[in-house]
Image (cartoon, rainbow, N blue to C red):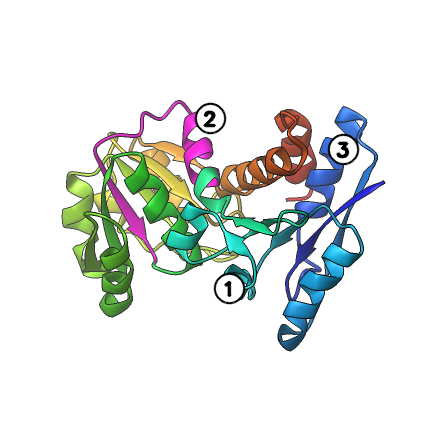
């Protein structure tokens, strides 16, 4: 049996185990996906232990993504983002599949990624989204509550610009893509984006997936925009990890059903 798992603290809320195990079941792979919750000082030992135990792959979540980047060999994209969320344990290579999660979520909804993108939030998810969209050739504007943090990210992303949240209305008037990478709207009826700034020419991805239909997505739908809920990003980062680990095409339908049945 192959063993895969998740490193984080806490991890009890994670939806990765049912999603990945649905894929193993669908393809008849003899594997198990388990969770590990080491204390942060023990993270290097946890990675060494995973290698010694023959664990094939690890996902990495909060608060370890940046630290793990320094403990494995990050691929070029993960190194630029500065965070690893997927490790191929036998090779010691780390990847960031959050970036692919953003792109594949839009592609699933037939969104042509071109023009101008606005990323709200400059944390880990915002970094992945900004690099992913810039790599697709979009002009990226980063808006964050703290402008200094947006500026720090924009300095790393080719061609990106930094703004405060008060610039959103002006930025969105000319934008084609909007990604909310803040936690605003998570289990609350709030939005980081003024409803009047949204329009029918936008494709809007909200990384929040609890609830699936956030206030931002409701406002965007009313404005005629294409909407993508956060579970699609969560699904496709997992799909990307599964395919990196196994070399198999992921059973996206089975993974999506397992994920959404628990939301």
Q: Which mark lies nearer to you, 3 or 1?
A: 1
* Span shown in magenta: 101-121
State the mark number for residue 70: 1
Inter-mark Cα distance, 3 to 2: 22 Å
Q: Which residue is mark 3?
A: 24
Whichever of callouts 3 and 2 sits on the residue coming sooner in the sequence is 3
Quarter where residue 139 is shown: top left
Picture coordinates of residue 134, whole percent (x, y): 28, 41
Picture coordinates of residue 106, whole percent (x, y): 41, 31
What is the tally of numbered marks visible in this picture?
3
Residue 253 in sight in this render: yes
Residue nearest the viewer, comparing 90 with 154: 90
Q: Relative to 250, is 159 on the left or the right? A: left
Inter-mark Cα distance, 3 to 1: 30 Å
Residue shown at the point (34%, 59%) measured from the top left: 122
Residue shown at the point (83%, 34%) measured from the top left: 30
Q: Which residue is mark 2?
A: 108
Considering the image in quadrants, where does the C terminus appear?
Answer: top right
Using a 10 Å C-alpha cutoff, classify the residue at mark 2 as few (fewer than 14 neighbours), some (14 to 19) or many (20 or more): few
Q: Are circles 2 and 1 on residues that touch, CB within 8 Å?
A: no
Using a 10 Å C-alpha cutoff, classify the residue at mark 3 as few (fewer than 14 neighbours), some (14 to 19) or many (20 or more): many
């Amino acid at each position: 049996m192959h063993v895969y798992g998740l490193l984080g603290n806490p991890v009890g809320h994670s939806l990765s185990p049912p999603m990945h195990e649905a894929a193993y079941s669908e393809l008849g792979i003899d594997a198990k996906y388990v969770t590990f919750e080491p204390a942060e000082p023990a993270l290097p030992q946890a990675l060494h232990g995973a290698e010694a135990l023959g664990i094939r792959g690890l996902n990495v979540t909060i608060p370890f993504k940046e630290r793990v980047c320094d403990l494995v060999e990050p691929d070029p994209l993960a190194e630029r983002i500065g965070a690893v969320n997927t490790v191929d344990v036998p090779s010691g290579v780390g990847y960031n599949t959050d970036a692919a999660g953003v792109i594949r979520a839009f592609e699933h909804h037939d969104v042509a990624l071109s023009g101008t993108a606005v990323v709200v939030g400059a944390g880990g998810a915002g970094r992945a989204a900004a690099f992913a969209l810039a790599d697709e050739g979009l002009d990226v504007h980063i808006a964050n509550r703290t402008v200094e943090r947006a500026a720090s990210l924009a300095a790393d992303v080719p061609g990106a610009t930094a703004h405060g949240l008060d610039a959103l209305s002006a930025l969105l008037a000319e934008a084609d893509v909007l990604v909310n990478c803040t936690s605003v709207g998570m289990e609350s009826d709030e939005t980081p984006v003024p409803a009047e700034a949204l329009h029918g020419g936008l494709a809007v991805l909200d990384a929040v997936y609890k609830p699936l239909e956030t206030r931002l997505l409701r406002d965007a739908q009313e404005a005629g925009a294409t909407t993508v809920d956060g579970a699609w990003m969560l699904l496709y980062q997992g799909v990307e990890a599964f395919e990196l680990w196994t070399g198999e095409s992921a059973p996206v339908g089975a993974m999506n059903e397992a994920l959404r049945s628990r939301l």
